[in-house]
């Protein structure tokens, strides 16, 4: 079985820098508006992208010159967002205590996304973390 071609596609390469988190949110908001995604679904996607980008910027442990790529596709009614970085560590959900200041990002992704996972990149170093959301787009 082959993967269907996306109805819509967008992608960006951004520096591994904290400012890239805000930039990726802005880019996805603009793209979601162009794709006419309903506002609640667009905002959920932006929030979850922000979590994945933050993790990539904080934990990738790759050379500062390496970029983080974000890729968004819509196939049918499913929006898939992927974040790839050159770090070799695989993220995992944590059980953050009420006093922890971080560690809730992947739990948020797991709670709000239809599906999510991580995979190593088949032809290079690093990994891709992705999530999917079902949409009600026109």
Image (cartoon, grey):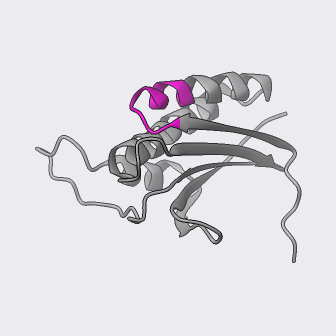
Image quadrant containing the C terminus:
top right
Count of picture labels = 0
Span colored in magenta: 15-25
Q: Image check: 74 left or right of 7?
A: left
Please state which of residues 119 and 7 is positioned toward the viewer in this rendering: 119
The question of residue 37 being in magenta is answered with no
Figure quadrant of residue 33: top right
Rendering coords of residue 47 (x, y %):
48, 35
The answer to whether 113 appears left or right of 37 in the picture is left
Q: Residue at x 53, y 65 (%)?
A: 125
Furthest toward the bottom, the residue is 1
Residue that appears at 55% across and 33% down: 46
The rendered magenta stretch, by its main secondary structure, is classed as helix
Which residue ends up furthest to the left in the rendered image?
99
Q: Position of residue 80 (x, y in %)?
A: 67, 50
Q: Is residue 16 magenta?
A: yes
Q: Give the vertical position of 17 relative to 128 (above or below).
A: above
User: Is 90 on the left-hand or right-hand side of 113?
Assistant: left
88 relative position to 10: left or right: left
Height in image: 129 above or below 124?
A: above
**Camera-nearest residue between 56 and 110:** 56
Name the image quarter holding residue 30: top right
Quadrant where the N terminus is found in the figure: bottom right
Q: Position of residue 61 (x, y in %)?
A: 35, 53
Q: Percent position (x, y) of residue 91?
A: 39, 61
Q: Is residue 103 above or below residue 42?
A: below
User: Which residue appears at 71% of the width and 42% of the height?
Assistant: 135
């Amino acid at each position: 079985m082959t993967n269907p071609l996306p109805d819509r596609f967008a992608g960006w390469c951004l520096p591994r820098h904290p400012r890239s988190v805000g930039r990726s949110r802005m880019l996805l908001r603009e793209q979601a508006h162009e794709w006419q995604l309903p506002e609640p679904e667009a905002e959920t996607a932006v929030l979850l992208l922000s979590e994945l980008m933050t993790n990539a910027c904080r934990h990738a442990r790759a050379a500062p010159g390496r970029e983080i790529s974000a890729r968004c596709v819509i196939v049918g009614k499913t929006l898939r967002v992927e974040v790839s970085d050159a770090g070799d560590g695989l993220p995992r959900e944590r059980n953050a205590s009420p006093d922890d200041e971080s560690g809730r990002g992947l739990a948020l992704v797991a709670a709000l996304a239809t599906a999510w996972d991580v995979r190593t990149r088949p032809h290079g170093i690093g990994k891709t973390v992705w999530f999917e959301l079902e949409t009600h787009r026109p």
